[in-house]
Image (cartoon, rainbow, N blue to C red):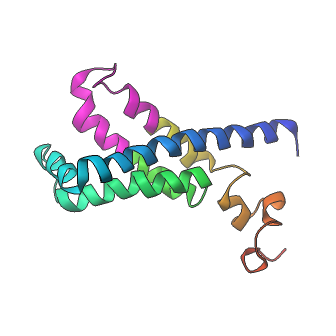
């Protein structure tokens, strides 16, 4: 293994931890402070179809998806769902407000592109995905029933 590969894997770990924490906290906020009904009301006011269902899906993608990204489990699928959520948020909510915060696209665009990077690269070697599906150093730590036959 080259040093460059090691640093790439460490960089992906840092990206996953930061991105996952942000998504988790936003999902937690939607679940506990705004509430599913409040999120559904907001989505409905934006013209999103099936706002109740989509509110639950959004909370799940952010809350559970944040944890999955942090641990590197089902990373590409989860990150792709987060790309979609941030694309919708960017187009429906933030684009009319320009680029800069507090209401512009810069935050959702950053989250979308970071999630896209993980969708494209995968989680790296320091992840549950690597442990289950293939990185030798982490695979050795997995229970025998999870290891792939060599």
Q: Is residue 141 above or below residue 13?
A: below
Seen at 38% across and 50% down, the residue is: 28
Whether residue 115 appears in this view of the structure is no
Outermost residue on the bottom side: it is 145
Residue 120 place in picture, x, y as percent: 57, 46
Task: Give the quadrant of residue 7.
Answer: top right
- Secondary structure mostly taken by the magenta-highlighted segment of the chain: helix
- Give residue 26's quadrant in the image: top left
Q: Is residue 112 above or below residue 128?
A: above
- The foreground one among 120 and 142 is 142
Look at 33% across and 27% down and name the residue there. Answer: 105
Residue 5: give x, y in percent of width and height: 80, 41
Judge from the rendering whether residue 107 lies leftward or rightward of residue 93; answer left or right.
right
Q: For the point 57% across and 45% down, which residue is it?
A: 118
Left or right of residue 5, residue 63 in this image? left
Determine whether, in the image, residue 21 is placed left or right of residue 46: right
Residue drawn at (34%, 54%), measured in percent from left and top? Answer: 59
- Residue 141 visible? The answer is yes
Q: Is residue 81 in the magenta section?
A: no
- Residue 112, image x and y in percent? 43, 38
> Does the magenta segment cover residue 86?
yes
Total count of labels: 0
In the picture as drawn, the residue positioned furthest to the front comes out as 33
Screen quadrant of the C terminus? bottom right
- What x and y, as percent, mark residue 1? 88, 46
Q: What stretch is highlighted in magenta?
A: 85-111
């Amino acid at each position: 293994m080259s040093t460059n590969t090691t640093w790439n894997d460490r960089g992906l770990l840092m990206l996953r931890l930061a991105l996952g924490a942000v998504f988790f906290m936003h999902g937690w906020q939607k679940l506990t402070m705004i509430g599913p009904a409040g999120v559904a009301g907001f989505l409905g006011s934006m013209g999103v179809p099936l706002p109740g269902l989509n509110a639950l899906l959004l909370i799940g993608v952010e809350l559970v998806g944040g944890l999955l990204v942090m641990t590197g489990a089902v990373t590409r699928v989860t990150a792709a769902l987060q790309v979609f959520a941030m694309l919708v948020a960017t187009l429906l909510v933030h684009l009319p407000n320009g680029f800069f915060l507090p209401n512009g696209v810069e935050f959702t665009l950053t989250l979308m592109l970071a999630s896209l990077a993980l969708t494209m690269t995968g989680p790296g070697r320091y992840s549950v995905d690597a442990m289950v599906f293939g990185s030798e150093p982490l695979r050795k730590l997995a229970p025998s029933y999870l290891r792939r036959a060599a």
